Image (tube, rainbow, N blue to C red):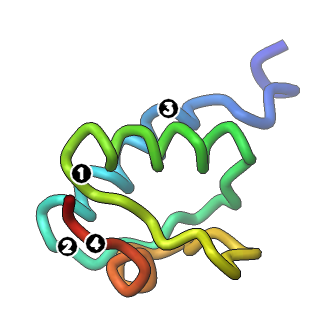
Amino acid sequence: MLSLQKHLNKDKICNTFVDNFLNNINYTAIEEFSLIDEAWIQKTLRDHGFKIKCDGLNIFPSNTSDLKKITYQL
């Protein structure tokens, strides 16, 4: 049944995305983030002192450089 899992290893992808963001490494996620992934990324960034400007944000960034443009530190 593992072959049918479309969100398999998403936790690792999200962790890699956040780690690269925090370490200023340009990274592009291969897969599209789900709403749950986006919420988890936002919460993790908030735990590290970053907030996302969500006003007008319809499509969540898939790379860290675009994410940097819409974040600010608390």
The correct choice, above or below, for 18 with respect to 44 in the image is: below
Q: Which mark is residue 11?
A: 3
Q: Secondary structure at mark 2?
A: loop
Mark drawn on residue 3: none
- Depth check, mark 4 against mark 3: the one in front is 4
Residue holding disc 1: 19
- The quarter of the picture where the C terminus appears is bottom left
Amino acid bearing label 3: Asp
Q: Residues within 10 Å of mark 3 (few under 14, many from 20)?
A: few
Which residue occupies the foreground of this view, 44 or 18? Answer: 44
Instruction: Name which of mark 4 and mark 1 comes first in the sequence.
Output: 1
- Whether tag 3 and tag 1 are in contact, CB under 8 A, the answer is no
Q: Earlier in the sequence, mark 4 or mark 3?
A: 3
Mark 3–mark 1 Cα distance, whole angstroms, equals 12 Å
From this view, report whether residue 2 is shown above or below residue 33.
above
Q: Secondary structure at mark 1?
A: helix
Q: Percent from the top left, x then y, of residue 52?
A: 44, 65
